[in-house]
Image (cartoon, grey):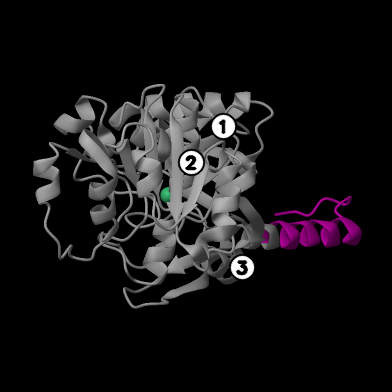
Amino acid sequence: MEVPVFFDFCTFVSIISFSIRSSLKNFIHMKSAAVVNYAPEKGAVEIRELDKPVIGDEDVLLEVANVGVCGSDLHQWTSDHSWPVNYPVVLGHEFGGYVVEKGSRVTGWQEGDRVVSETAAVIDPANPMSRRGLYNLDPTRKGFGYGVNGAMTRFVRVPARCLHQVPEGLAFEQACLTEPCSVAYNAIVENSRIKPGDRVIVLGPGTIGILCAAVAVLCGAEVAIVGLEADKTRLDIARQYGCDTIAGDATEWARKRDGLGADCVIDAAGVSATLKIAMQLVRPNGLITKVGWGPQPLGFSLDPLVQKNVTLQGSFSHNWPVWERVLALLASGKLNVKPIIGGVWPITEWHEAFEKMHKGEVVKSVLKPV
Ligand SMILES: [Zn+2]
């Protein structure tokens, strides 16, 4: 091809340098640091550089603004989880960010939209549970952070059906905690149907326990949250949500009104043995809702359930209407997650963020991609 006369040396140099810069930029954009859980062994988590995900027709590419560390991320790190993990996998399922790309069949979302994402990354829409709106209970579902790559990195591929708009004025550092708030809302409102005036005991002052207590207070219940002596820091934070806090035995609180026990006990402790305490504290014909995981076998009798005619209810995950209501509560300030956030770390410092939560020095750690 003939080179035009105005294509001088300077132009040539600037074109070359532009193309070097843009390919460098592309290169930088191609690889991002990610917190990867790479094997089932204890401690098998490290930072890896991963390619930007390729999205499908019904997905968006989300640029992560913030991602919360969940107890389940810690469980996978310490390898005491009881769900199947697709190794290697990027951790993180509590996240929000900006839509930066969208698939050809995505409607209703634009680049630049501020969004949070539900966790059921893969579902079977034909499953009977999905068809009744309970896709969170589709047994074939796969979630971010264990089934598919999660959000402890810069870019994550998200099906558009998972997205919710973040209300104006709600910062991502708080919005990323819509997920654990939705776990609590589903446990307290949908599954436990807490009524004003109920006496509710929450076992375990972790994120889910504290948020369950907060939502039960919003429902008009009298609430106590129970932990160990070692949980003092977390119980002090829980007190800000208008509940009583107890380090140790809660029997007296449970029996205070009429001597019979609490209307509802929420087990959010994360060890199976606390079910025994829940059975002691609940009143006859009461309800125990188990929201904490604990893979250990029980080793005690469930006869008190029979004797007291108690309902034992499991509560898992959440669905679309729960998310919308939680976002409304976060936007109005009725539910405030600021007291539980112990700090924001760059994802490359994931270890410190995990460790602080693991030791109970903070209730919730939040990460930011680098
Ligand atoms: Zn979570």
What residue did someone put label 1 on?
335
Q: Residue at x 59, y 58 (%)?
A: 233
Magenta region: 1-23
What residue did someone put label 2 on?
211
Q: Residue at x 49, y 74 (%)?
A: 46
What residue did someone put label 3 on?
348
Kind of residue sitting beneath label 3: Thr
Q: Position of residue 254 (x, y in %)?
A: 36, 41
Q: Give the mark nearest the N terminus, 3 or 2.
A: 2
Residue 302 appears left or right of 188: left
Q: Is residue 214 above or below residue 133?
A: below
Q: Quadrant of the C terminus?
A: bottom right
Q: Nearer the viewer, residue 368 or 111?
A: 368
Q: Is residue 221 above or below residue 36?
A: above
Q: Is residue 17 magenta?
A: yes
Q: Quadrant of the N terminus?
A: bottom right
Rendered image: mark on residue 365: none
